[in-house]
């Protein structure tokens, strides 16, 4: 759906000074970010900024002394002040080069640190955030210019200080000539600056408003140029359709930005002429006074230079405020994202667990229990789960059965604390899940979800990521490969465990769906200490023989462990001690396979339908 671009916002209440105050709201926090990235470079940036603000005053004064010495026919004084001005110009050039270098290097350092901060924040957020489009808009806005805006805001802050120092010096010189000149210097620059600030805010509002469409553009680009979608794009002839959408959206963005740039350039250019007229009016007055003999050539030169440079300094100061205002608007996106509340209550993710998994298992025995648990996705009225009361004793096996969307996977995500219950409570070994450290809790689970990841890494890492503490434990990785039934896959690869998987990188090998699933199963079996195994449609992409082999191994590995299996295949389901049938997020039946078939309810009907397909 197309939306018209937002209209230009009305001027904020309080005018320029209100915008000045707003532009400073994030400077302090941003300065702390820069300081943490590199204190020595921050200090050097401040010192060079101060020197850069004072040196132009010395150059203006040296210029006056040169003209006075020339008029007085004093050759030695003329040479002396020319050399002095040369030295100051060299110092200024070195300072400006140094400032440019510092801004580049510090910007690189800050870009890395802020992107790491953004990703660390993402790691600490609850899973529900990643299933919310508004969160992705916030993430897109935070990451979009995270590498450039902070250093730009700090640079503008130091530049503002530099401009103010220079302006105060030039203002002091011009007061000796005329207070009206100082007033004209200041007043003539304000209109163009206000226009810049106004259009900065409009540009910010447009870019934030179209964040969802920007993500849509990136998605279309991904679909058109990614191996994951290439087959269907070519087979169904999707390329021209999707490319037309990409072009249309790109052209819409181009038209909006072009119109904004043209309007911005027109008004700022027109208003900047006010400053030009003010300068030449003052220049004419000074020239007439010098022609009448009421002003020396040296003073006229100094005043003209002071007015010109002072006007530029004032314009730089106001321009710096305008730029800070713009950078501040974009920084608000970063701070809004970083202020997102952590999803999980209780112990924060990342805290070192108290004791290892083995010691916790020694005190286990009560198993899992759900007490009137309900869950509703944020922003949704419908309940994904409701009134779920269930007990899973330690060492027992549970199978979850139901149609797609019945709530089976949601239930598993609640048990592993990827979601928090909207109502009710879940207890593990007598302790509410809210009281468990999330890392300690999740180490007790070995999980394979139906939408498992296909990591574009070597085989060893693809399997080893199931237990990052044992990423280099080759014997454990080999055992996991055997447990997951992936030995035939690995044996058929040219470089064995060191074979890169996927086609994103050089020499990568793409696997079939069933082969990827075996690798994912092996990854789930890496957690040998886990006392709870969860398999969500673990054999959906496997043939009958491979499925039988996996479950024979699974039966062996599951001894003494609590197991939860989600499957549509009844030969798998019937092995469980207890089968639970979910419909519309509620438990409608529970019991053994024989009990449920004899009852003639939902389970029996589903079993009969599947059995009919094999006759």
Image: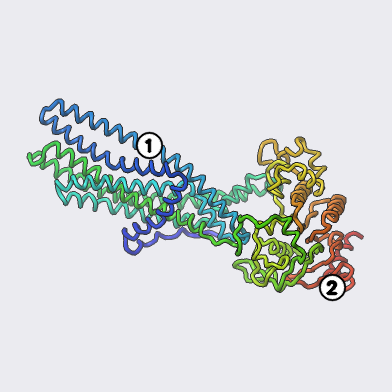
In the rendered image, which quarter is residue 590 located in? bottom right
Residue 607, position as x, y percentages in the image: 86, 65
Res. 234 in view = no
The quadrant in which the C terminus is found is: bottom right
In the displayed orientation, state which residue is furthest to the left: 293
Image position of 422 with respect to 326: above or below: below
Residue 103, position as x, y percentages in the image: 41, 41
In the displayed orientation, state which residue is furthest to the top: 75
Q: Which residue is mark 1?
A: 98
Point 34% across, 37% down: residue: 95
Image position of 243 with respect to 497: above or below: below
Point 35% across, 59% down: residue: 21
Res. 473 in view = yes
Query: Which numbered disc, 1 or 2, marks the residue closer to the eye?
Result: 1
Nearest to the observer: residue 272 or residue 596: 596
Residue 596 - label? none
Q: Does label 1 or label 2 sit earlier along the sequence?
A: 1
Q: Secondary structure at mark 1?
A: helix
In the rendered image, which quarter is residue 198 located in? bottom left
Q: CA distance from mark 1 to mark 2?
A: 79 Å
- Colouring style: rainbow
Q: Which residue is mark 2?
A: 601
In the rendered image, which quarter is residue 580 located in? bottom right
Point 59% across, 56% down: residue: 124
The quadrant in which the N terminus is found is: bottom right
Q: Relative to residue 387, is residue 6 drawn left or right? A: left
Please rate how many residues cluster around mark 2, counting C-alpha atoms within 10 Å: few if below 14, some from 14 to 19, many from 20: few
Residue 357, position as x, y percentages in the image: 72, 56
């Amino acid at each position: 759906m197309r939306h018209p671009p937002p209209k230009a916002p009305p001027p904020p209440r309080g005018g320029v000074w209100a915008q000045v105050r707003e532009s400073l709201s994030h400077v302090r926090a941003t300065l702390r970010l820069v300081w943490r990235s590199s204190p020595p470079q921050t200090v050097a940036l401040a010192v060079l900024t101060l020197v850069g603000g004072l040196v132009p005053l010395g150059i203006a004064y040296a210029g006056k002394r040169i003209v006075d010495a020339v008029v007085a026919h004093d050759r030695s004084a003329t040479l002396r002040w020319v050399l002095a001005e040369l030295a100051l110009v060299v110092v200024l050039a070195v300072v400006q080069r140094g400032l440019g270098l510092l801004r580049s290097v510090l910007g690189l350092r800050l870009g890395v640190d802020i992107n790491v901060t953004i990703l660390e924040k993402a790691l600490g957020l609850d899973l529900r955030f990643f299933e919310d489009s508004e969160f992705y808009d916030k993430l897109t806005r935070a990451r979009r210019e995270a590498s450039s805006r902070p250093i730009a805001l700090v640079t503008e802050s130091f530049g503002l200080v530099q401009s103010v120092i220079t302006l105060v010096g030039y203002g002091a010189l011009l007061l000796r000539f005329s207070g009206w000149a100082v007033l004209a210097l200041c007043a003539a620059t304000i209109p163009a600056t206000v226009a810049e600030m106004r259009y900065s805010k409009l540009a910010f509002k447009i870019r934030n408003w179209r964040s969802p469409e920007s993500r849509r553009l990136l998605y279309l680009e991904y679909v058109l140029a990614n191996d994951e979608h290439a087959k269907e794009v070519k087979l169904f002839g999707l390329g021209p359709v999707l490319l037309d959408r990409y072009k249309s959206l790109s052209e819409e963005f181009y038209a909006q930005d072009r119109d904004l740039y043209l309007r911005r350039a027109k008004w700022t250019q027109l208003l900047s002429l006010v400053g030009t007229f003010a300068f030449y009016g003052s220049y004419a007055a000074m020239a007439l006074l010098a022609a009448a003999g009421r002003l020396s050539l040296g003073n006229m030169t100094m005043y003209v230079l002071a007015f010109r440079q002072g006007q530029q300094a004032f314009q730089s100061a106001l321009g710096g405020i305008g730029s800070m205002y713009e950078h501040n608007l974009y920084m608000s996106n970063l701070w809004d994202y970083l202020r997102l509340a952590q999803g999980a209550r209780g112990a924060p993710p990342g805290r070192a667990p108290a004791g290892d998994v083995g010691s916790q298992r020694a005190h286990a025995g009560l198993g899992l229990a759900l007490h009137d648990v309900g869950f509703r996705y944020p922003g949704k009225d419908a309940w994904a789960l409701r009134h779920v009361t269930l007990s899973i004793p330690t060492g027992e096996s549970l199978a979850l059965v139901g149609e797609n969307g019945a709530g089976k996977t949601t239930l598993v995500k609640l048990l592993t604390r990827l979601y928090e219950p909207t109502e009710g409570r879940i207890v593990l070994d007598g302790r509410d899940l809210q009281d468990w450290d999330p890392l300690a809790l999740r180490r007790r689970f070995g999980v394979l979800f139906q939408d498992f990841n296909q990591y574009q890494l070597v085989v060893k890492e693809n399997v080893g990521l199931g237990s990052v503490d044992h990423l280099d434990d080759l014997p454990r990785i080999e055992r996991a490969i055997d447990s997951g039934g992936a030995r035939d896959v690995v044996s058929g690869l040219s470089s064995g465990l060191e074979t890169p998987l996927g086609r994103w990188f050089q020499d990568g090998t793409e696997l079939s769906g069933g082969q990827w699933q075996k690798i994912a199963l092996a990854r789930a079996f890496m957690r040998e200490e886990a006392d709870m195994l969860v398999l969500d449609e673990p054999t959906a992409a496997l043939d009958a023989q491979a499925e039988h082999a996996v479950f024979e191994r699974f039966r062996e590995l599951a001894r003494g462990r609590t197991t939860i299996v989600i499957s549509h295949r009844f030969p798998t389901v019937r092995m469980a001690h207890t089968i639970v049938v979910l419909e519309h997020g509620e438990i409608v039946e529970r019991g053994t396979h024989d009990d449920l078939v004899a009852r003639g309810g939902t389970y029996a009907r589903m079993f009969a339908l599947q059995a009919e397909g094999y006759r």
